[in-house]
């Protein structure tokens, strides 16, 4: 793969030198347009620690060929701190945590397009990603008795080396027929993801006088391997007629996931494999989909109707202290429809409804128990079901800078990690389908050009959220709230090569699953410079300038109250530069595969 990338980087220069030779032979000939475009981009970001990223994007086009390719290398540092206070009937756990992750990543992408004939084109792309990371987490928990007297301290840390690889290969064939919008596509896709990590957790309980408590030492390490393969094949034909446009197609997706986890617990100086915390899991998902879409225009009306039929077979097993088989079959009918009416003067009214399905991400499927510290852990669940959402939207745009919209989303069997409290006041997070969610939203958007040098976009949103519990340990919740943002873009010269933006947003108190979040707001600022005949773009950005995005939340589960504070270091300074040379009409564009949803799971 490395040789392919080097060859592609050399091709533009070889072709350009040949074009120059032709020009020397005959100065009367027209100078040929450059066949390539190269973007070199780099950025530097600083909050608590620095991060940087550098890449090169190359486009080469000649006759029936076009090649997009990209190489990217970066070092990223993440730092955050958080507080979790848990109030049991007999004890209170007041915990603080600081986390630091450093990741070195590499990404290579290539997309080759060949025009087989005037009507037929083939695309081949390959994407390769690799990252290595190091993690360090420090925990400090003060544990008080029911009288509020300090009983003991827990001091612990977690370290881990980890690496991940993701490789994808995709082939797409497109054929256009003689009639407009009459075409056929077929696409095949393969993605492989593999990852390894070796988290080690150590901790010790101390008495209030600072002496270590015998028998209250925690020591465990983990060897975790994950391999995921996703295969897909899909085809579609679009058939226009004088009555309507018809699209029909089908898709097959096969997912095979293998999870291998080994948790070792230190027992009197010897590390012993804990089978209960060391599951082997194979998860196989086989999906077959057939769909059809209809489009029809009648005077000022545009109608669309779609229907998708999906059949899913899930098989596999989980083996820890015993073996449990995974065996599920389910079918879903997913309709979608929309209608748009265009008034005189450009005003438009649109109505749409869509039923969608969200499958659990692969991390949620993994049944491994991830240990944070002696008093907190996390467990995935391969038996979790997909969630279903009904999405209803109504919008009206006018003048045409204004738009008013209403939306309603009902999500059934929402997927999340529900906290449960076990013996010894150990807090575990288990992935489950444990609530339904209704969201009503009213949104007003306004765009305006105040002067030749100042533009503003304004959004005001009111919402009502309601959760309906599917388990007995949490109660239903509902809340009214609002969200607002103001984006201002301004220019500092007539040629508009120097511009800036000043953005502010505010989110009122809201709910997310079983959590209630306090209000948040942020002010962001940026400048953009187009230099050297607009070949060089320089961006300078400051996010969360007021350092206001602290995340405060609380929950009550099984009558146990918890308070949270998360600070994810959103405040940062970033400077980014992109230099482009060659043919400005050629733009780099990474094509997204039809199976991108499963790639991102």
Image (spheres, rainbow, N blue to C red):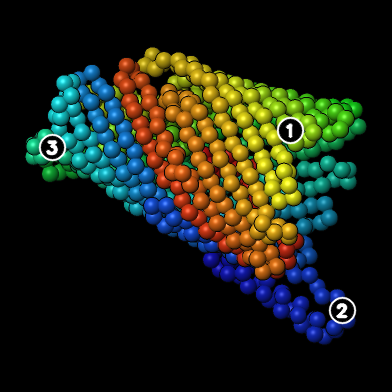
The residue pinned by badge 2 equals: 29
CA–CA distance in space, label 1 to label 2? 52 Å
| Residue 229 appears left or right of 402 | left
Task: Nearest to the eye among marks 1 and 2: give it.
Answer: 1
**Front residue (pair 580, 150):** 150
The residue pinned by badge 1 equals: 402
Task: Nearest to the eye among marks 2 and 3: give it.
Answer: 3
89 versus 232 height, above or below: above
At label 1, counting other C-alpha atoms closer than 10 Å, the crowd grade (few under 14, some 14-19, many 20 or more) is: some
Residue 225: x percent and y percent? 37, 45
The residue pinned by badge 3 equals: 206
Element carrying mark 1: strand
Q: Give the image quarter of residue 109.
A: bottom right
Residue 567: x percent and y percent? 39, 40
Total numbered labels placed on residues in the image: 3
Residue 98: x percent and y percent? 31, 44
**Front residue (pair 227, 243):** 243
| Residue 79 appears left or right of 291 | left
Label pair 1/2, CB-CB below 8 angstroms: no
């Amino acid at each position: 793969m490395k040789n392919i990338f080097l060859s592609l980087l050399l091709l533009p220069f070889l072709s350009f030198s040949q074009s120059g030779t032709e020009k020397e032979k005959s100065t009367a000939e027209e100078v040929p347009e450059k066949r390539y475009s190269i973007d070199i981009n780099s950025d530097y970001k600083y909050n608590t620690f620095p991060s940087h990223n550098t890449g090169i994007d190359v486009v080469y086009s000649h006759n029936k060929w076009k090649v997009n390719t990209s190489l990217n290398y970066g070092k990223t540092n993440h730092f955050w701190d958080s507080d979790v206070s848990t109030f049991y009937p007999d004890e209170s756990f007041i915990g603080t945590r600081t986390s630091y992750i450093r990741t070195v990543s590499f990404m290579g992408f290539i997309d080759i397009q060949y025009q087989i004939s005037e009507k037929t084109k083939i695309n081949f792309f390959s994407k390769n990603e690799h990252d290595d990371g190091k993690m360090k987490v420090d925990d400090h928990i003060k544990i008080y008795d029911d009288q509020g007297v300090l009983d003991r301290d827990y001091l612990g840390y977690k370290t881990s080396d980890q690496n991940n690889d993701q490789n994808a290969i995709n082939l797409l064939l497109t054929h256009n027929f003689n009639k407009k919008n009459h075409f056929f596509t077929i696409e095949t896709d393969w993605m492989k993801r593999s990852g390894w990590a070796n988290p080690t957790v150590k901790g010790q309980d101390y008495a209030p006088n600072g002496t270590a408590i015998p028998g209250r030492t925690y020591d465990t390490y983990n060897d975790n391997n994950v391999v995921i393969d996703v295969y897909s094949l899909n085809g579609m034909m679009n058939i226009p007629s004088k009555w309507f446009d018809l699209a029909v197609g089908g898709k097959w997706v096969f997912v095979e996931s293998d999870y291998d986890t080994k948790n070792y617990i230190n027992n009197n100086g010897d590390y012993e494999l804990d089978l209960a915390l060391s599951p082997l899991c194979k998860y196989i998902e086989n999906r077959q989909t057939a769909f059809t879409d209809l489009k029809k225009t009648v005077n000022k009306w545009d109608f669309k109707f779609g229907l998708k039929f999906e059949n899913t077979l899930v098989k596999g097993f989980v083996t820890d202290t015993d073996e449990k088989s995974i065996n599920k079959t389910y079918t879903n009918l997913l309709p979608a429809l929309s209608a748009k009416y265009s008034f005189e003067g450009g005003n438009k009214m649109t109505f749409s409804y869509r039923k969608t399905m969200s499958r659990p991400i692969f991390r949620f499927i993994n049944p491994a128990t991830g240990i944070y510290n002696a008093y907190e852990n996390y467990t995935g669940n391969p038996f979790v079901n997909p969630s279903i959402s009904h999405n209803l939207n109504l919008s009206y745009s006018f003048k045409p800078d204004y738009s008013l919209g209403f939306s309603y989303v009902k999500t059934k069997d929402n997927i999340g990690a529900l906290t449960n409290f076990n013996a010894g006041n150990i807090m575990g997070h288990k992935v489950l389908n444990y609530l339904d969610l209704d969201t009503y939203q009213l949104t007003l958007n306004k765009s305006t050009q105040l002067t030749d040098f100042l533009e503003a976009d304004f959004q005001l949103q009111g919402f009502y959220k309601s959760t309906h519990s599917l388990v007995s340990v949490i109660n239903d919740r509902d809340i009214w709230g609002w969200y607002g943002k103001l984006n201002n873009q301004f220019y500092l010269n007539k040629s508009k090569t120097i511009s800036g933006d000043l953005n502010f947003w505010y989110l009122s108190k809201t709910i997310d699953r079983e959590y209630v979040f306090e209000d948040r707001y942020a002010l962001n600022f940026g400048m953009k410079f187009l230099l050297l005949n607009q070949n060089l773009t320089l961006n300078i950005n400051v996010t969360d300038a007021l350092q206001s995005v602290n995340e405060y939340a609380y929950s009550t589960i099984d009558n146990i109250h918890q308070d949270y504070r998360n600070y994810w270091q959103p405040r940062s300074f970033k400077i980014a530069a992109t230099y482009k040379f060659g043919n400005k009409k050629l733009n780099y564009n990474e094509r997204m595969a039809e199976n991108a949803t499963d790639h991102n799971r």
